[in-house]
Image: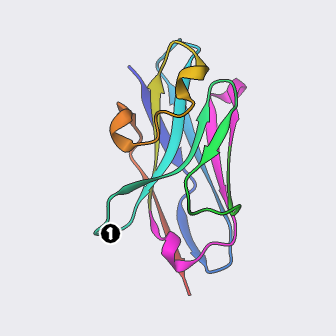
Amino acid sequence: QVQLVESGGGSVQAGGSLRLSCVASGFTATGYCMAWFRQAPGKGREGVAYISSDGTTRYGGFPRGRFTISQDNAKNTIYLQMNGLNTEDTATYYCALELVPAARYCRGNYERSTDYKHWGQGARVTVSS
């Protein structure tokens, strides 16, 4: 059974940084698409960053170079490094995973929350001014 566990959320002042981690377990397939989404109070879930099993990365429209997604295959972990945080980044951040036959299936696809079956419990990020 696939399990995703996030950590690293917390409170930070505007301009600060946080790094979120997501440990994945419970699968042996080598092809996957993974992503970070976020959901602010009263808003829908939006894509932040995406990474596929071959290390290819993509980003949603808003981070504009402030966020970086990466992975450590040896630890079955993806990360989201967030710099220059502002109050609009306050949200619960979720990691998501979808197993695919090969990494190329991720390209141009798997950008919507509805594309993902497996989700972590969420990590709360609060940015104060």
- Vertical placement of residue 113 versus 34, above or below: below
> Which residue is located at x 68 percent, y 74 percent?
16
- Vertical placement of residue 21 versus 14, above or below: above
Q: Please state if 126 lies on the left or on the right of 79 as rendered.
A: left
Image-quadrant location for residue 63 = bottom right
Q: Nearer the viewer, residue 114 or 73?
A: 114
* Residue type, label 1: Pro
> Which residue is located at x 62 percent, y 72 percent?
85
> Which residue is located at x 48 percent, y 39 percent?
5
Residue 48, position in %: x, y? 53, 53
User: What span is in magenta?
Assistant: 70-91
**Which residue corresponds to mark 1?**
41
Look at the image and tell me in which quarter the N terminus lies. top left
Residue 128, position in %: x, y? 53, 82
| In magenta stretch: residue 85 | yes
Residue 82, position in %: x, y? 65, 61
Determine crowd level at label 1: few under 14, some 14-19, many 20+ residues with C-alpha closer than 10 A. Answer: few
| In magenta stretch: residue 54 | no
Residue 19, position in %: x, y? 65, 56
> Which residue is located at x 56 percent, y 58 percent?
61
Q: Please state if 102 lies on the left or on the right of 27 as rendered.
A: right
